[in-house]
């Protein structure tokens, strides 16, 4: 199976992909499933799931939550996560039967709040995987560090495009056999992708978020 496990729609202020376009293009890229992970909302994911008419294509309801330690990807949600404190987020997700993944843990950025801040010894038993390939990295070494961390912890790794714009879609993905939950639990996943357009996409998101904020303020 080939899933892109990190995607945003226009329900995220830093992206502009319409749900119908995301679904169309990710299928065109040959994916078998997708996780829609807008920032602090499942509206985009619910929309994509409703639009999907292919029972053999899985749409995972998720979101990307900002916590006191850093961003967290959540999968298989029934309702939006209200908490912003890491361990409270974990509790909310687990009560829904969901999964927790740490995305882009070593992302290089001029924003100091995006540096690695996870107390890994405290959280390693609370997470289901680490995102080991994010297509929006500036440097491949940032993904390499995530891969080394996952190997050190003996935990599953995932890949996701972190798509915010049309040209991002399908740039990274996760490979596994059978069921995603089981593959993550037993550390039986692989990942691949390209960071070719990562810096461009990151710049566009920065500008869009600032412009959007100024318009809505």
Image: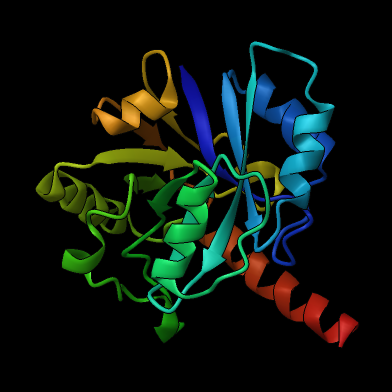
Q: Is residue 186 above or below residue 57?
A: below
Question: Is residue 89 visible in this depiction of the protein?
Answer: yes
Residue 33, picture quadrant: top right
Name the side, left or right, on which 165 lies relative to 100: right
The outermost residue toward the front is 95
Name the residue at the left extreme. 152
Q: Seen in the image, is 88 located left or right of residue 125?
A: right
Residue 52 versus residue 212 in the image, above or below: above
Does the image show residue 190?
no
List x then y, in percent, for residue 118.
29, 71
Q: Is residue 10 left or right of residue 107?
A: right
Residue located at (20% from left, 47% from top): 150
Measuring from the top left, give residue 115's x and y in whole percent. 35, 76
Give whichever of 14, 83 is nearer the camera.
Answer: 83
Camera-nearest residue between 139 and 66: 66
x%, y% of residue 87?
39, 68
Q: Quadrant of residue 58?
A: top right
């Amino acid at each position: 199976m080939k899933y892109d496990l990190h995607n945003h729609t226009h329900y995220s202020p830093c992206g502009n992909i319409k749900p119908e376009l995301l679904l169309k293009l990710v299928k065109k890229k040959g994916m078998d499933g997708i996780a829609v992970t807008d920032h602090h909302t499942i509206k985009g994911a619910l929309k994509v799931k409703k639009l999907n008419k292919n029972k053999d294509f899985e749409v995972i309801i998720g979101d990307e939550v900002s916590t006191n330690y850093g961003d967290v990807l959540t999968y298989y949600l029934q309702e939006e996560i209200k908490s912003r404190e890491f361990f409270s987020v974990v509790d909310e997700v687990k009560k829904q039967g969901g999964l927790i993944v740490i995305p882009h843990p070593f992302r290089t950025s001029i924003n100091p709040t995006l540096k690695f801040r996870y107390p890994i010894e405290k959280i390693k038993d609370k997470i289901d995987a680490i995102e080991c390939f994010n297509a929006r990295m500036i440097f491949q070494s940032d993904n390499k560090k995530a891969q080394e961390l996952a190997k050190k912890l003996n935990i599953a790794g995932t890949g996701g495009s972190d798509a915010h714009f049309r040209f991002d879609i399908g740039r990274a993905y996760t490979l596994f056999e059978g069921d995603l939950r089981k593959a993550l639990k037993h550390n039986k996943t692989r990942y691949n992708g390209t960071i070719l357009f990562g810096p461009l996409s990151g710049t566009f998101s920065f500008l869009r978020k600032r412009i959007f904020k100024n318009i809505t303020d």
